[in-house]
Image (cartoon, rainbow, N blue to C red):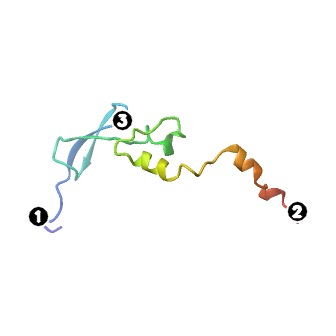
Amino acid sequence: MKKNIHPDYHEIEVVMTDGTKFKTKSTWGKKGDVLNLDIDPKSHPAWNAGEKKLVDAQGQISKFEKKFKSYKRNKENNASQPDPENKKK
């Protein structure tokens, strides 16, 4: 390996959204720094089947909802559409 071209690889502490902590190695920050996560597998709807809501820290969720507020997905709309499996051949 060439010298003085690689980032420092050191141990940091990661704090999950529920307060649990673990140590890992990373090039982020400095040795001993603490990385507090805003979103992790315990809080993101993609990993918890939508059981928890995201905290809208920067207004991104609000922007998305405002942009797509006229598009609604509900059972009534889906029921009025024909079922693709029941097509006549």
**Front position in the image: 49 or 72:** 72
**Front position in the image: 66 or 28:** 66
Say whether disc 1 or disc 2 marks the residue closer to the N-terminus: 1
Q: Is residue 3 above or below residue 8?
A: below
Local SS, label 3: loop
Q: From this viewpoint, which residue is outermost toward the right?
A: 89
Residue 13: name its quadrant: top left
Q: Is residue 36 left or right of residue 82?
A: left
Amino acid type indicated by mark 1: Asn
Which circle, 2 or 3, is nearer the viewer?
2
**Front position in the image: 28 or 4:** 28
Query: At 19% from the left edge and 41% from the top edge, which residue is drawn?
Result: 33
The picture places residue 82, in percent across and down from the top left corner, at: 79, 56
Amino acid type indicated by mark 3: Thr
Disc marking residue 4: 1
Disc marking residue 88: 2
Residue 59: name its quadrant: top left
Q: In this view, does 88 lie to the left or right of 63?
A: right
Say whether disc 2 or disc 3 marks the residue closer to the N-terminus: 3
Q: Do the residues labelled 2 and 3 touch (CB within 8 Å)?
A: no
Q: Give the CA separation, mark 1 to mark 3.
A: 35 Å
Q: Do the residues labelled 1 and 3 touch (CB within 8 Å)?
A: no
Q: Is residue 38 left or right of residue 29?
A: right
Local SS, label 2: loop
Q: From this viewpoint, which residue is outermost toward the left?
A: 4
